[in-house]
Image (cartoon, rainbow, N blue to C red):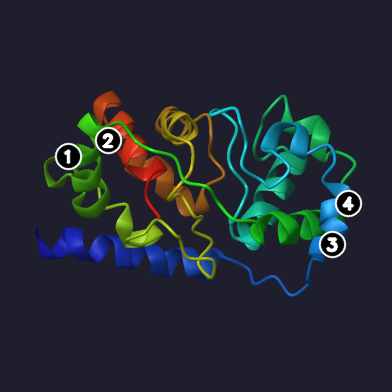
């Protein structure tokens, strides 16, 4: 692996940390639980959703959850299901909901065995030939992310959701990523690579 490829994830992390604003306000997980009645219909009572196209919220970093809720409310991230759900939420509601779901235990899935080797190779080493950097450079060896930099936990997430998110980044229909980093990575991913890394990630913990 070239020196440039090894350094890229570190540069990306540094850029993201510059762009990530620290959250000073705190959420109340008990208040969040009482406010989560609508959320649990799709995301599950403990944040582990049943539909593989709806993300698991359990164990996700609170600051990332708040950032996504704000993006849905402002229109920076568009989703016909989420937009009306977040419309009535105050900032404190978002903090409370994030505190509740982040405190829940994520239940990982199980990826397809035939995809795991290719997915692991891409996640940990990227694809030098096409300029795809290693996912682990920002999201960590276990997929736990980096809350200070705004990088989400992706280990244990639904494979279908991860794959769709990567396709959305690749196509530019999702564009609220920090400094365009995910779009930059996803634009060079093939369909087969997206499926493989998604299958690998769903069982990563």
- Label placed on residue 130: 1
Q: Residue at x 31, y 39 (%)?
A: 197
For the residue carrying disc 3, how many other residues have a C-alpha within 10 Å: few (<14), some (14-19), or many (20+)?
A: few
Secondary structure at numbered mark 1: helix
| Whole-percent x, y for residue 89 in the image | 87, 47
- Say left or right for 45 vs 113: right
The quadrant in which the N terminus is found is: bottom left
Upstream in sequence: badge 4 or badge 1: 4
Q: Nearer the viewer, mark 3 or mark 2?
A: 3
Circle 4 residue: 34
Residue 83's x, y, as percent? 76, 32
Using the numbered discs, state the Cα–Cα distance from disc 4 to disc 3 in whole angstroms: 7 Å
Is residue 128 left or right of 132 when viewed as pictured?
Answer: left
Q: CA distance from mark 3 to mark 2?
A: 42 Å
**Could you tell me which residue is drawn at 79 percent across and 72 percent down?**
25
Near mark 2 (Cα within 10 A), the count class, few <14, some 14-19 or many ≥20, is: some
Instruction: Check disc 4 and report its element: helix, strand or loop.
Output: helix
Quarter of the figure that contains the C terminus: bottom left
- Residue 188 circle label: 2
- Upstream in the sequence, badge 3 or badge 2? 3
Q: Is residue 51 above or below residue 92?
A: above
Q: How many marks?
A: 4
Pointer 4 local density, CA inside 10 Å: few below 14, some 14–19, many at least 20:
few
Q: CA distance from mark 1 to mark 2?
A: 6 Å
Say which of 93 and 114 sits in front: 114
Q: Are marks 3 and 2 in contact (CB under 8 Å)?
A: no
Query: Label 3's element?
Result: helix
Q: Which residue is mark 3?
A: 30
């Amino acid at each position: 692996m070239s020196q440039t490829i090894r350094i890229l994830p570190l540069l990306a992390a540094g850029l993201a940390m510059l762009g990530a604003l620290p959250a000073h306000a705190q959420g109340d997980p008990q208040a969040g639980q009482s406010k989560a009645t609508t959320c649990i219909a799709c995301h599950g009572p403990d944040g582990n959703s049943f539909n593989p196209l709806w993300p698991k919220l359990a164990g996700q970093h609170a600051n990332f959850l708040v950032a996504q809720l704000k993006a849905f409310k402002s229109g920076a991230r568009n989703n016909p299901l989420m937009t009306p759900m977040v419309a009535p939420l105050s900032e404190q509601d978002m903090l409370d909901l994030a505190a509740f779901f982040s405190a829940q235990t994520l239940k990982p899935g199980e990826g397809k065995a035939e995809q795991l080797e290719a997915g692991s190779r891409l996640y940990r080493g990227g694809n030098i030939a096409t300029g795809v950097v290693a996912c682990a450079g920002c999201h960590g060896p276990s997929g736990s992310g980096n809350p200070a930099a705004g990088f989400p936990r992706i280990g244990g997430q639904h494979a279908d959701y991860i794959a769709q998110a990567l396709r959305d980044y690749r196509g530019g229909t999702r564009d609220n990523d920090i400094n365009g980093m995910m779009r930059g990575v996803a634009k060079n991913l093939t369909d087969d690579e997206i499926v493989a890394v998604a299958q690998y990630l769903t069982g990563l913990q």
